[in-house]
Amino acid sequence: MIKEGLLEEKRLLIVEFDPNKHNDRTWCFWGEEPIEKNWDFVNFSWNQVQIFGESQSIKPYTYHHCRSEAFYQFVKNALESSEGVDWCLGKVLEAVQLEGQFFVQVKIEGNLDEVYDVDADWFFGSGTAISGQEITLWQSFVGWRVKCNPGAHLFDSKSFRMMDFDIEQAGKTRFLYILPFGDAEALIEVTQFDKEILGLDEGQELLREICEKRNWEVLKMEVECNAIPMSSRFDSVRRFHKAGTRMIPLGVAAGALKPTTGYGFIRMMKHGKAIASALRSNDLIPTLYRKKRFRFYDNLLLRILQNHPTRGKQIFVQLFHHKKASMILRFLNEQTNLLQEIMIFMWLPKRLFIRNLIAKWKG
Ligand SMILES: Cc1cc2nc3c(=O)[nH]c(=O)nc-3n(C[C@H](O)[C@H](O)[C@H](O)COP(=O)(O)OP(=O)(O)OC[C@H]3O[C@@H](n4cnc5c(N)ncnc54)[C@H](O)[C@@H]3O)c2cc1C
């Protein structure tokens, strides 16, 4: 908004209820283009991935890493230079746009429990009010940022590890990410797809077992623990919001996360830019629409992961055995064409997919 000059005549109120936004998550993303010059929050990038013990290039992609702490600071620095931004530590209780009105009535609870009513020309809402019952599958993360003895050379800083399934599955779909920042420093993170959220204690126990099994003597520096919904309920079926809509969802609430992977950072960045540009030119506001066939693939895989959680490992291992990682990254980025997708599906357990496809059609 600042870049588009939108805050020269209007003011932006940012309402945030968490007073301690700290390094609560790690964001990774990949792309073909070099990252923007001022994205100094990206502090590590890899051109190779290690799969089944061997490194392979992910050309034309580069996989990037940033700490959320650095990103929050980057945003705060950018906002500081603008006169048009106010911060409020508080909670949005309600936001309503009544029919025929072109403004949004927002109820905000301040930090001293006072409630304020604000009429806003636009409301952009990050954060989701979802209850546990509404989500049938969760992607949980429990990660450790670790250091080891510099002579130990436990990690290969040139290649990251994505979806290492060589860990205890316990009837679920579980894998390990290893993001090495040097020979002796890495983020090791257990990821789980399951109906239940992986708790901190259980996740840490798993990490302890993994380190022991792999003979890794590590010193825990930081812990990361969180979960995101794996659901297609936030998917948009329209490319643009209806004319006159003044309440615009952002992030997870806008369907930014690919339901089967949880990646969404780069889509959120692009969405932000597209919204600001549409506001500038008075165009319809874009949603985070994804092509129908990719929504369909995600729904089918979600169904399988939900109904046959023990088959997740087989599906992904088969895929990584037969296809190059760069092609899988292209597919996950939804940049493949139909022929490439058919070549990918050839390597999936066909009977399982066909059975679930039929069951899905039968409703
Ligand atoms: C541990 C973890 C790791 C992840 N790793 C990756 C990754 O590697 N790559 C990737 O692409 N994606 C990743 N994701 C997914 C996704 O990018 C993040 O979940 C992202 O932070 C979602 O952005 P958001 O704006 O929807 O929600 P959030 O980042 O959670 O932001 C919502 C904000 O709104 C505030 N808020 C919520 N409700 C209210 C309210 N009523 N009033 C006031 N304030 C409110 C919250 O305090 C919060 O600050 C990860 C997610 C998690 C949890």
Image (tube, rainbow, N blue to C red):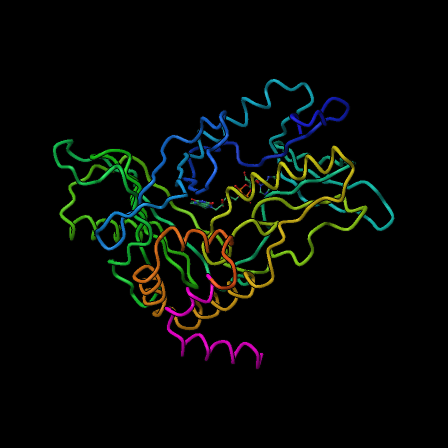
Magenta residues, start to end: 340-363
Q: Residue at x 22, y 39 (%)?
A: 156
Percent from the top left, x then y, of residue 295? 56, 61
Q: Residue at x 66, y 59 (%)?
A: 237
Percent from the top left, x then y, of residue 37? 49, 26
- Residue 174, located in which quarter of the rendered image? bottom left
The answer to whether residue 294 is magenta is no
Nearer-the-camera pick, 227 or 45:
45
Q: Is residue 324 visible?
A: yes
Locate residue 173 relative to residue 88 in the image: left or right. left
Locate residue 26 relative to residue 182 in the image: left or right. right
Q: Is residue 73 visible?
A: no
Judge whether 283 appears above or below 295 on screen.
above
Q: Residue at x 12, y 32 (%)?
A: 151
Nearer-the-camera pick, 266 or 211:
266
Locate residue 104 relative to residue 273 in the image: left or right. right
Quarter of the N terminus within the rendering: top right
Percent from the top left, x then y, of residue 51? 27, 53
Judge whether 252 appears above or below 74 on screen.
below
Locate residue 24 relative to residue 156 in the image: left or right. right
Of all residues, the one furthest to the right in this rendering is 100
Q: Residue at x 85, y 45 (%)?
A: 101
How many marks are shown on the rendered structure? 0
Secondary structure mainly formed by the magenta segment: helix
